[in-house]
Amino acid sequence: MTVGEMKVEAVVLEGTRVRLEPLARAHQAGLCEIGLEQELWRWIPTPVRNMGDMAAYIDLALKEYANGLSLPFAQIEKSTGRVIGSTRYMNIDKTHHRVEIGSTWIGREWQRTAVNTEAKYLLLRHAFETLGCLRVELKTDSLNDKSRAAILRIGAKEEGIFRNHMITSSGRVRHTVYFSVVDSEWPGVKARLERKLNRPGVAD
């Protein structure tokens, strides 16, 4: 039985293709290089349109980190050292040993590649094997079929739809689909992801 609060601290998560390092203002220029394409933000409630928006995006993430609400990362392609996106643990519940993997976006060039698969693997492994999570949540816009399919490919279970969950920047009312992986499922999900990552030419 898990007791006590989780201890969630800044950490570097290292894979063979991608490194997740704590998000910092120093990542802003790199994120702007690949992250101002508007299609990347189509399904995110508050889009980033310019360098000022990106600075505000980073500052909000760092404020949430300071308040213990999230742990944001920059995604770094190991072969080039380039910043290629961002992700985070969010909605951290230290008492009930629960986190959400969210606010994830990645440059178009790296979408549907093993980089994205490995990043999710690293986050899930750290959540279950180091933080001691009982549950990891993921969620997406109900209209985002691409994201829904990608989350299912990870091995997460769809739980249901929160109707009228958010108002997006365009004024559209968003329904949100919730998914999860729980601790008893992690060994199977882990084995599945490791098989996938070890296959030549793996894609997300």
Image: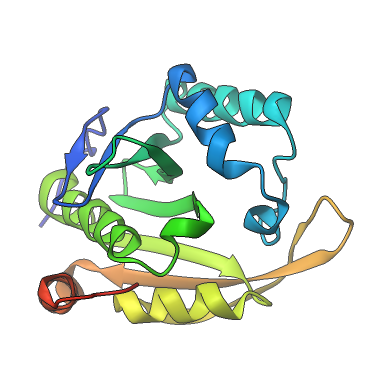
**Compared with residue 67, is residue 153 higher up or lower down, i.e. above or below?**
below
Farthest residue in the front direction? 80
Farthest residue in the right direction? 171
Q: Quadrant of residue 142?
A: bottom right
What's the residue at 19%, 67% (across, down)?
183
Please state which of residues 170 and 7 is positioned toward the viewer in this rendering. 170
Please state which of residues 77 and 158 is positioned toward the viewer in this rendering. 77
Please state which of residues 25 and 78 is positioned toward the viewer in this rendering. 78
**Compared with residue 32, is residue 204 higher up or lower down, i.e. above or below?**
below
- Residue 74 visible, this orientation: yes
Q: Total number of numbered labels?
A: 0
- Picture coordinates of residue 195, whole percent (x, y): 11, 78
What's the residue at 44%, 27% (across, down)?
65
**Compared with residue 44, is residue 47 higher up or lower down, i.e. above or below?**
above
- Picture coordinates of residue 7, whole percent (x, y): 22, 33
Q: Is residue 146 left or right of residue 14?
A: right
- Picture coordinates of residue 1, whole percent (x, y): 10, 57
- Residue 187 visible, this orientation: no
Q: In which quarter of the image is residue 138?
A: bottom left
**Compared with residue 145, is residue 66 higher up or lower down, i.e. above or below?**
above
Q: In which quarter of the image is residue 75?
A: top left
Q: Which colour scheme is used?
A: rainbow
Quarter of the picture containing the C terminus is bottom left
- Picture coordinates of residue 58, whole percent (x, y): 55, 27
What's the residue at 43%, 36% (across, down)?
70
What's the residue at 47%, 81% (across, down)?
149
